[in-house]
Amino acid sequence: MQGGLVAFPTETVYGLGADAASRAAVAKIYEAKGRPSSHPVIVHIAKPEDMAAWCQDIPDQVWALARAFWPGPLTLILKRHVAVDASVSGGQDTIGVRCPSHPVAQALLIKFAELKAAAGQPRAGVAAPSANRFGRVSPTQADHVRTEFASMWPDGLLVLDGGDSEVGIESTIVDLSGVQNGLSPALLRPGAISLEALQSVLGCPVTGHTAQSPRVSGSLKAHYAPFTPLILCVEHKLEDCVRDWLDTHEGNVAVLLRSDRQLPLDRVHLIRMPMMPAAYARALYATLRRVDESGVSVVIAEQVPDEPDWMGVRDRMNRAAAAFEGNSSQT
Ligand code: TXA
Ligand code: MG
Protein backbone atom coordinates (compact mmCIF):
# COMPACT_ATOMS: atom_id res chain seq x y z
CA MET A 1 0.00 0.00 0.00
CA GLN A 2 2.83 2.36 1.00
CA GLY A 3 0.79 5.56 1.08
CA GLY A 4 -1.22 4.59 -2.00
CA LEU A 5 -4.65 3.10 -2.55
CA VAL A 6 -5.71 -0.49 -3.09
CA ALA A 7 -9.21 -1.76 -3.81
CA PHE A 8 -9.99 -5.06 -2.14
CA PRO A 9 -12.91 -7.46 -1.72
CA THR A 10 -14.80 -7.87 1.52
CA GLU A 11 -17.77 -10.11 2.22
CA THR A 12 -20.08 -7.06 2.11
CA VAL A 13 -18.83 -4.88 -0.78
CA TYR A 14 -15.45 -3.89 -2.22
CA GLY A 15 -13.46 -1.30 -0.29
CA LEU A 16 -11.00 1.39 -1.39
CA GLY A 17 -8.21 1.03 1.14
CA ALA A 18 -5.37 3.14 2.45
CA ASP A 19 -3.10 3.12 5.50
CA ALA A 20 -5.44 4.37 8.23
CA ALA A 21 -2.53 5.79 10.22
CA SER A 22 -1.42 8.06 7.38
CA ARG A 23 -3.26 11.34 7.04
CA ALA A 24 -1.94 11.77 3.49
CA ALA A 25 -3.07 8.29 2.44
CA VAL A 26 -6.53 8.81 3.92
CA ALA A 27 -6.77 12.15 2.08
CA LYS A 28 -6.29 10.25 -1.19
CA ILE A 29 -9.41 8.19 -0.47
CA TYR A 30 -11.50 11.30 0.00
CA GLU A 31 -10.12 12.80 -3.18
CA ALA A 32 -10.72 9.65 -5.23
CA LYS A 33 -14.28 9.24 -4.00
CA GLY A 34 -15.20 12.90 -4.19
CA ARG A 35 -16.34 12.52 -0.61
CA PRO A 36 -16.52 15.48 1.81
CA SER A 37 -13.68 15.26 4.34
CA SER A 38 -16.17 15.54 7.21
CA HIS A 39 -17.47 12.03 6.48
CA PRO A 40 -15.69 9.35 8.53
CA VAL A 41 -14.33 6.12 7.04
CA ILE A 42 -14.18 2.67 8.61
CA VAL A 43 -10.86 1.26 9.84
CA HIS A 44 -10.50 -2.43 8.93
CA ILE A 45 -8.47 -4.57 11.31
CA ALA A 46 -7.08 -8.10 11.08
CA LYS A 47 -8.35 -9.32 14.44
CA PRO A 48 -10.64 -8.07 17.21
CA GLU A 49 -7.81 -7.30 19.68
CA ASP A 50 -6.47 -4.70 17.22
CA MET A 51 -9.46 -2.56 18.22
CA ALA A 52 -7.53 -1.38 21.25
CA ALA A 53 -5.01 0.44 19.03
CA TRP A 54 -7.75 2.56 17.44
CA CYS A 55 -10.40 2.91 20.15
CA GLN A 56 -10.47 3.74 23.84
CA ASP A 57 -12.98 3.31 26.69
CA ILE A 58 -14.19 0.12 25.02
CA PRO A 59 -17.29 -1.13 26.89
CA ASP A 60 -17.33 -4.86 27.80
CA GLN A 61 -20.37 -5.45 25.61
CA VAL A 62 -18.25 -4.60 22.58
CA TRP A 63 -16.07 -7.65 23.10
CA ALA A 64 -19.20 -9.80 23.21
CA LEU A 65 -20.27 -8.40 19.84
CA ALA A 66 -16.79 -8.93 18.42
CA ARG A 67 -16.76 -12.55 19.62
CA ALA A 68 -20.20 -13.18 18.13
CA PHE A 69 -19.89 -11.44 14.77
CA TRP A 70 -16.22 -10.89 13.86
CA PRO A 71 -14.75 -11.51 11.46
CA GLY A 72 -17.91 -10.46 9.64
CA PRO A 73 -20.25 -7.76 8.33
CA LEU A 74 -20.46 -5.60 11.46
CA THR A 75 -18.97 -2.14 12.06
CA LEU A 76 -18.69 -0.76 15.59
CA ILE A 77 -18.57 2.95 16.35
CA LEU A 78 -16.48 3.60 19.48
CA LYS A 79 -14.49 6.39 21.08
CA ARG A 80 -11.47 7.22 18.94
CA HIS A 81 -8.13 6.56 20.63
CA VAL A 82 -6.58 9.85 21.60
CA ALA A 83 -3.41 9.01 19.65
CA VAL A 84 -5.30 8.37 16.39
CA ASP A 85 -5.43 11.21 13.88
CA ALA A 86 -8.96 12.60 13.46
CA SER A 87 -8.74 12.60 9.65
CA VAL A 88 -9.98 9.01 9.53
CA SER A 89 -13.11 9.86 11.49
CA GLY A 90 -13.99 13.07 9.72
CA GLY A 91 -12.86 15.11 12.73
CA GLN A 92 -15.21 13.33 15.15
CA ASP A 93 -14.11 11.85 18.46
CA THR A 94 -15.51 8.46 17.47
CA ILE A 95 -14.14 5.87 15.08
CA GLY A 96 -15.66 3.04 13.05
CA VAL A 97 -13.87 -0.34 13.19
CA ARG A 98 -14.56 -3.59 11.39
CA CYS A 99 -12.86 -6.96 11.10
CA PRO A 100 -13.91 -8.39 7.72
CA SER A 101 -14.09 -12.11 7.00
CA HIS A 102 -13.28 -12.26 3.29
CA PRO A 103 -10.07 -14.32 2.94
CA VAL A 104 -8.46 -11.77 0.59
CA ALA A 105 -9.27 -8.92 2.99
CA GLN A 106 -7.92 -10.99 5.88
CA ALA A 107 -4.72 -11.79 3.98
CA LEU A 108 -4.24 -8.12 3.10
CA LEU A 109 -4.80 -6.99 6.69
CA ILE A 110 -2.52 -9.62 8.19
CA LYS A 111 0.27 -8.85 5.72
CA PHE A 112 -0.14 -5.12 6.32
CA ALA A 113 0.04 -5.61 10.09
CA GLU A 114 3.24 -7.65 9.67
CA LEU A 115 4.85 -4.92 7.55
CA LYS A 116 3.83 -2.26 10.04
CA ALA A 117 5.15 -4.28 12.97
CA ALA A 118 8.45 -4.81 11.15
CA ALA A 119 8.67 -1.03 10.74
CA GLY A 120 8.07 -0.59 14.47
CA GLN A 121 4.52 0.73 13.99
CA PRO A 122 2.09 -1.39 15.98
CA ARG A 123 -1.02 0.51 14.91
CA ALA A 124 -2.09 -1.32 11.72
CA GLY A 125 -5.41 -0.76 10.02
CA VAL A 126 -6.78 -0.14 6.56
CA ALA A 127 -9.18 2.77 6.18
CA ALA A 128 -11.71 1.82 3.54
CA PRO A 129 -15.01 3.19 2.41
CA SER A 130 -16.92 1.32 -0.27
CA ALA A 131 -14.99 1.62 -3.55
CA ASN A 132 -17.48 3.79 -5.40
CA ARG A 133 -17.76 7.48 -6.14
CA PHE A 134 -19.62 9.39 -3.41
CA GLY A 135 -23.34 8.63 -3.31
CA ARG A 136 -23.32 5.81 -5.89
CA VAL A 137 -24.11 2.15 -5.25
CA SER A 138 -21.31 0.11 -3.75
CA PRO A 139 -19.32 -2.32 -5.92
CA THR A 140 -19.78 -6.05 -5.37
CA GLN A 141 -17.39 -7.19 -8.13
CA ALA A 142 -13.85 -6.18 -9.08
CA ASP A 143 -15.12 -4.97 -12.47
CA HIS A 144 -17.53 -2.57 -10.79
CA VAL A 145 -14.56 -0.90 -9.08
CA ARG A 146 -12.55 -0.68 -12.29
CA THR A 147 -15.50 0.89 -14.10
CA GLU A 148 -16.17 3.32 -11.28
CA PHE A 149 -12.65 4.77 -11.37
CA ALA A 150 -11.77 4.19 -15.04
CA SER A 151 -11.82 7.86 -15.98
CA MET A 152 -9.79 8.82 -12.94
CA TRP A 153 -7.06 6.21 -13.39
CA PRO A 154 -7.03 5.14 -17.04
CA ASP A 155 -3.89 3.12 -16.29
CA GLY A 156 -5.78 1.29 -13.63
CA LEU A 157 -6.16 1.18 -9.91
CA LEU A 158 -4.81 -1.86 -8.08
CA VAL A 159 -7.92 -3.99 -7.58
CA LEU A 160 -7.62 -7.32 -5.76
CA ASP A 161 -10.21 -9.57 -7.35
CA GLY A 162 -11.99 -11.74 -4.79
CA GLY A 163 -15.04 -12.62 -6.85
CA ASP A 164 -18.59 -11.56 -6.05
CA SER A 165 -19.22 -10.16 -2.57
CA GLU A 166 -21.23 -12.69 -0.64
CA VAL A 167 -23.37 -10.34 1.45
CA GLY A 168 -23.81 -7.67 -1.22
CA ILE A 169 -24.85 -4.72 0.97
CA GLU A 170 -22.68 -2.76 3.38
CA SER A 171 -22.03 -3.81 6.97
CA THR A 172 -24.45 -3.29 9.83
CA ILE A 173 -23.24 -0.26 11.84
CA VAL A 174 -23.83 -0.05 15.60
CA ASP A 175 -22.84 2.98 17.63
CA LEU A 176 -21.64 2.09 21.13
CA SER A 177 -19.68 5.28 21.70
CA GLY A 178 -22.20 6.62 24.21
CA VAL A 179 -22.79 3.43 26.18
CA GLN A 180 -20.47 4.42 29.00
CA ASN A 181 -22.41 7.67 29.36
CA GLY A 182 -25.66 5.78 29.70
CA LEU A 183 -26.83 5.95 26.07
CA SER A 184 -28.25 2.85 24.42
CA PRO A 185 -26.41 1.23 21.54
CA ALA A 186 -27.83 2.62 18.29
CA LEU A 187 -28.24 1.00 14.91
CA LEU A 188 -26.86 3.51 12.39
CA ARG A 189 -27.11 1.33 9.28
CA PRO A 190 -29.01 -1.97 8.98
CA GLY A 191 -27.25 -4.85 7.25
CA ALA A 192 -26.88 -8.60 7.23
CA ILE A 193 -26.56 -8.78 11.02
CA SER A 194 -30.05 -8.11 12.25
CA LEU A 195 -31.26 -5.91 15.07
CA GLU A 196 -32.57 -9.02 16.84
CA ALA A 197 -29.19 -10.75 16.63
CA LEU A 198 -27.45 -7.68 18.07
CA GLN A 199 -29.97 -7.32 20.88
CA SER A 200 -29.70 -10.95 21.83
CA VAL A 201 -25.91 -10.74 22.18
CA LEU A 202 -26.00 -7.36 23.94
CA GLY A 203 -28.92 -8.31 26.18
CA CYS A 204 -30.38 -4.82 25.83
CA PRO A 205 -32.41 -2.84 23.32
CA VAL A 206 -30.65 -1.24 20.35
CA THR A 207 -32.28 2.02 19.31
CA GLY A 208 -32.61 3.50 15.86
CA HIS A 209 -30.77 6.56 14.64
CA THR A 210 -31.18 9.50 17.05
CA ALA A 211 -30.34 13.19 17.02
CA GLN A 212 -27.30 12.41 19.19
CA SER A 213 -26.02 9.77 16.80
CA PRO A 214 -22.85 10.55 14.89
CA ARG A 215 -23.13 11.60 11.28
CA VAL A 216 -23.17 8.76 8.78
CA SER A 217 -22.92 9.58 5.09
CA GLY A 218 -24.92 6.45 4.32
CA SER A 219 -27.71 7.83 6.48
CA LEU A 220 -28.20 10.79 4.19
CA LYS A 221 -31.62 10.41 2.61
CA ALA A 222 -30.34 10.23 -0.94
CA HIS A 223 -27.51 7.74 -0.99
CA TYR A 224 -26.66 4.46 -2.67
CA ALA A 225 -28.31 5.52 -5.93
CA PRO A 226 -28.10 4.11 -9.43
CA PHE A 227 -28.09 6.58 -12.35
CA THR A 228 -31.46 5.32 -13.58
CA PRO A 229 -34.40 6.70 -11.56
CA LEU A 230 -35.87 4.08 -9.25
CA ILE A 231 -39.55 3.94 -8.29
CA LEU A 232 -40.77 1.59 -5.56
CA CYS A 233 -44.23 0.13 -5.74
CA VAL A 234 -46.28 -2.29 -3.64
CA GLU A 235 -46.78 -5.63 -5.33
CA HIS A 236 -50.52 -5.37 -5.95
CA LYS A 237 -50.18 -1.96 -7.62
CA LEU A 238 -47.18 -2.89 -9.72
CA GLU A 239 -48.94 -3.40 -13.02
CA ASP A 240 -50.88 -0.11 -12.67
CA CYS A 241 -47.71 1.69 -11.79
CA VAL A 242 -45.88 0.35 -14.85
CA ARG A 243 -48.84 1.13 -17.13
CA ASP A 244 -49.09 4.69 -15.75
CA TRP A 245 -45.43 5.25 -16.42
CA LEU A 246 -45.64 3.84 -19.97
CA ASP A 247 -48.69 5.98 -20.75
CA THR A 248 -46.91 9.16 -19.81
CA HIS A 249 -43.29 8.52 -20.86
CA GLU A 250 -41.20 7.34 -23.75
CA GLY A 251 -38.44 4.78 -23.34
CA ASN A 252 -38.19 1.40 -21.70
CA VAL A 253 -38.82 0.25 -18.14
CA ALA A 254 -36.93 -2.34 -16.13
CA VAL A 255 -39.17 -4.03 -13.58
CA LEU A 256 -37.62 -5.79 -10.58
CA LEU A 257 -39.95 -8.34 -9.12
CA ARG A 258 -39.83 -11.32 -6.79
CA SER A 259 -43.17 -12.82 -7.71
CA ASP A 260 -43.50 -15.02 -10.77
CA ARG A 261 -46.26 -12.86 -12.23
CA GLN A 262 -46.12 -11.91 -15.91
CA LEU A 263 -46.37 -8.37 -17.24
CA PRO A 264 -47.44 -8.71 -20.86
CA LEU A 265 -46.51 -5.14 -21.82
CA ASP A 266 -44.26 -3.70 -24.49
CA ARG A 267 -41.18 -1.69 -23.53
CA VAL A 268 -40.82 -3.69 -20.29
CA HIS A 269 -37.74 -5.70 -19.26
CA LEU A 270 -38.62 -8.06 -16.45
CA ILE A 271 -35.84 -8.84 -14.00
CA ARG A 272 -36.60 -11.65 -11.58
CA MET A 273 -35.13 -11.02 -8.15
CA PRO A 274 -34.53 -13.65 -5.45
CA MET A 275 -37.31 -14.46 -2.99
CA MET A 276 -35.08 -14.59 0.09
CA PRO A 277 -33.47 -11.50 1.69
CA ALA A 278 -29.84 -12.69 1.74
CA ALA A 279 -29.92 -13.68 -1.92
CA TYR A 280 -31.74 -10.44 -2.82
CA ALA A 281 -29.07 -8.39 -1.04
CA ARG A 282 -26.34 -10.30 -2.88
CA ALA A 283 -27.93 -9.50 -6.24
CA LEU A 284 -29.17 -5.94 -5.65
CA TYR A 285 -26.24 -3.66 -6.54
CA ALA A 286 -25.04 -5.72 -9.51
CA THR A 287 -28.61 -5.63 -10.84
CA LEU A 288 -28.84 -1.85 -10.44
CA ARG A 289 -25.54 -1.47 -12.29
CA ARG A 290 -26.78 -3.70 -15.12
CA VAL A 291 -29.95 -1.64 -15.31
CA ASP A 292 -27.83 1.51 -15.64
CA GLU A 293 -25.95 -0.07 -18.55
CA SER A 294 -29.08 -1.28 -20.30
CA GLY A 295 -30.24 2.22 -21.20
CA VAL A 296 -33.77 1.91 -19.77
CA SER A 297 -35.38 5.17 -18.68
CA VAL A 298 -36.61 4.03 -15.31
CA VAL A 299 -36.58 1.04 -12.99
CA ILE A 300 -39.73 0.14 -11.12
CA ALA A 301 -39.19 -2.28 -8.25
CA GLU A 302 -41.65 -4.25 -6.21
CA GLN A 303 -41.35 -3.23 -2.55
CA VAL A 304 -39.66 -5.92 -0.49
CA PRO A 305 -41.42 -7.12 2.71
CA ASP A 306 -41.50 -4.92 5.78
CA GLU A 307 -39.93 -7.63 7.93
CA PRO A 308 -36.80 -7.72 10.13
CA ASP A 309 -34.77 -9.85 7.74
CA TRP A 310 -35.41 -7.38 4.93
CA MET A 311 -34.37 -4.26 6.86
CA GLY A 312 -31.00 -3.82 5.14
CA VAL A 313 -32.37 -4.28 1.63
CA ARG A 314 -35.37 -2.03 2.29
CA ASP A 315 -33.10 0.68 3.66
CA ARG A 316 -30.90 0.67 0.53
CA MET A 317 -33.86 0.59 -1.83
CA ASN A 318 -35.64 3.43 -0.04
CA ARG A 319 -32.51 5.56 -0.20
CA ALA A 320 -31.91 4.76 -3.85
CA ALA A 321 -35.50 5.77 -4.65
CA ALA A 322 -35.23 8.93 -2.52
CA ALA A 323 -32.30 10.10 -4.61
CA PHE A 324 -34.67 11.11 -7.38
CA GLU A 325 -36.47 14.30 -6.62
CA GLY A 326 -40.16 14.37 -7.36
CA ASN A 327 -40.15 10.61 -7.55
CA SER A 328 -42.90 9.72 -5.13
CA SER A 329 -42.53 6.15 -4.04
CA GLN A 330 -45.87 4.36 -4.32
CA THR A 331 -46.27 2.53 -1.07
O1 TXA B 1 -19.42 -3.04 4.52
C1 TXA B 1 -18.83 -1.98 4.72
O2 TXA B 1 -18.96 -1.34 5.77
C2 TXA B 1 -17.94 -1.44 3.61
C3 TXA B 1 -16.72 -2.36 3.46
C4 TXA B 1 -15.71 -1.85 2.47
O3 TXA B 1 -16.16 -2.57 4.72
N1 TXA B 1 -17.54 -0.10 3.88
C5 TXA B 1 -18.39 0.92 3.80
O4 TXA B 1 -17.78 2.14 4.00
O5 TXA B 1 -19.58 0.81 3.56
P1 TXA B 1 -18.48 3.52 3.67
O6 TXA B 1 -17.47 4.57 4.00
O7 TXA B 1 -19.01 3.50 2.29
O8 TXA B 1 -19.60 3.59 4.71
C6 TXA B 1 -19.24 3.60 6.06
C7 TXA B 1 -20.24 4.31 6.88
C8 TXA B 1 -20.38 5.73 6.44
O9 TXA B 1 -21.76 6.00 6.34
C9 TXA B 1 -19.73 6.49 7.55
O10 TXA B 1 -20.32 7.75 7.75
C10 TXA B 1 -19.92 5.56 8.74
O11 TXA B 1 -19.76 4.30 8.20
N2 TXA B 1 -18.91 5.79 9.76
C11 TXA B 1 -17.61 5.50 9.73
N3 TXA B 1 -17.01 5.96 10.84
C12 TXA B 1 -17.95 6.54 11.60
C13 TXA B 1 -17.96 7.23 12.83
N4 TXA B 1 -16.88 7.43 13.52
N5 TXA B 1 -19.13 7.70 13.27
C14 TXA B 1 -20.25 7.53 12.57
N6 TXA B 1 -20.32 6.91 11.39
C15 TXA B 1 -19.18 6.44 10.91
MG1 MG C 1 -20.25 3.79 0.81
Image: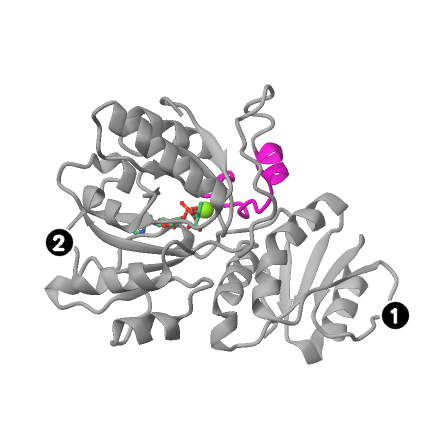
The residue segment tinted magenta is 130-148
Alpha carbons under labels 2 and 1: distance apart: 60 Å
Tell me the residue that label 2 is attached to. Answer: 57
Q: Is mark 1 within 8 Å of ligand 2?
A: no
Mark 2, Cα crowd under 10 Å, few <14 / some 14-19 / many 20+, is: few
Mark seen at residue 264: 1
Query: Which circle, 2 or 1, is nearer the viewer?
Result: 2
Residue located 75% across and 67% down the image: 242
Which percent across, then down, holds residue 60? Answer: 17, 63
Circle 1: element type = loop
Position of residue 17 in the picture relative to residue 164 (left or right): left
Outermost residue, bottom direction? 236
- Residue 220 locus on image (x, y percent): 41, 54
Q: Residues within 10 Å of mark 1 (few under 14, many from 20)?
A: few
Element assignment for label 2: loop
Could you tell me residue 160's position as x and y percent? 54, 34
Vertical placement of residue 311 versus 170, above or below: below
Closer-to-camera residue (221/162): 162
